Image (spheres, helix red, strand yellow):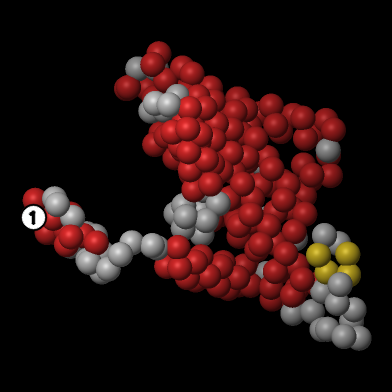
Amino acid sequence: MNESTKKKTLTYELGKGIIRENPVLCLLLGACPALAVTTGALNALEMGAAATAVLICSNAVISLIRRFIPDTVRIPAFITVIAGFVTIVQLIVKAYMPSIDESLGIYLPLIVVNCIILGRAELFASKKSILPSVADGTGMGIGFTAALLCMGIIRELLGTGGVFGVTLLPDNVYTPIAIFILPAGGFFVFGLLIALSNRLQKGMDTRPKNACSQCPSAKTCIALKEGSVDKC
């Protein structure tokens, strides 16, 4: 693989998690923290940053040791690596940023069982070299953070009239809708963002019409025969 191809591959792995394969809005992973901590934009940003740090570090280490992990114990091994980095992040937060530890509460240690992190370890880092794995973890982390931040900004703005604790809509101009900082409001905003993401996905689909039928392998394509691909 030449240098140009490597750069394109890393760029793709870095960018795919932001929109095309956003872990929250497209893959619907990590919905629990997405709904629980996005009552405020700051909480969302803090959770996203913590999860991104764990994603990058765990992907890197799992990629490095993937050849030494027996297949029969790979999941426990992955969880052990992830738990180690979550513990490091939690101890750093407790020591230097106690306010963040208090605001995130139980959801900070629960990063250990976040489906996004274990999923990327199993599906990607355990099969790829370190640079693509780090790029994948960074992209997925950015996508996760962006989704949480969008939810947090919308819910906080509509629910309190402010963002990051700063009042943008005074009481004499806007009456806060308290339901947006409650679970029901979280599900509502979550659904709207998923719909918007799906719309963006359709806009990014640049495949020509009847692309599958024009493919040289169309006659032997099992997916096309089973109807599991879009026939356009």
Task: Say whether residue 1 is left or right of residue 156.
Answer: left
Quadrant of the image occupied by residue 57: top right
- The quadrant of the rendering that contains the C terminus is bottom left
Q: Please, what secondary structure does the residue beneath circle 1 have? A: helix
Question: Is residue 73 positioned above or below 108 on the image?
Answer: above
Question: Residue 22, how many percent across, how many down?
Answer: 51, 53
Question: Is residue 155 positioned above or below 4 on the image?
Answer: below
Quadrant of the image occupied by residue 160: bottom right
Q: Nearest the camera: 222 or 73?
A: 222
Residue ID at (69%, 76%): 179
**Residue closest to the far left:** 219
At label 1, counting other C-alpha atoms closer than 10 Å, the crowd grade (few under 14, some 14-19, many 20 or more) is few
Quadrant of the image occupied by residue 175: bottom right
Question: Residue 133, how many percent across, how many down?
Answer: 49, 31
Question: Is residue 57 positioned above or below 152 on the image?
Answer: above
User: Does the rendering let one see residue 112?
Assistant: no
**Residue closest to the far bottom:** 172
> Hey, what amino acid is under mark 1?
Lys
Residue bearing the label numbered 1: 219
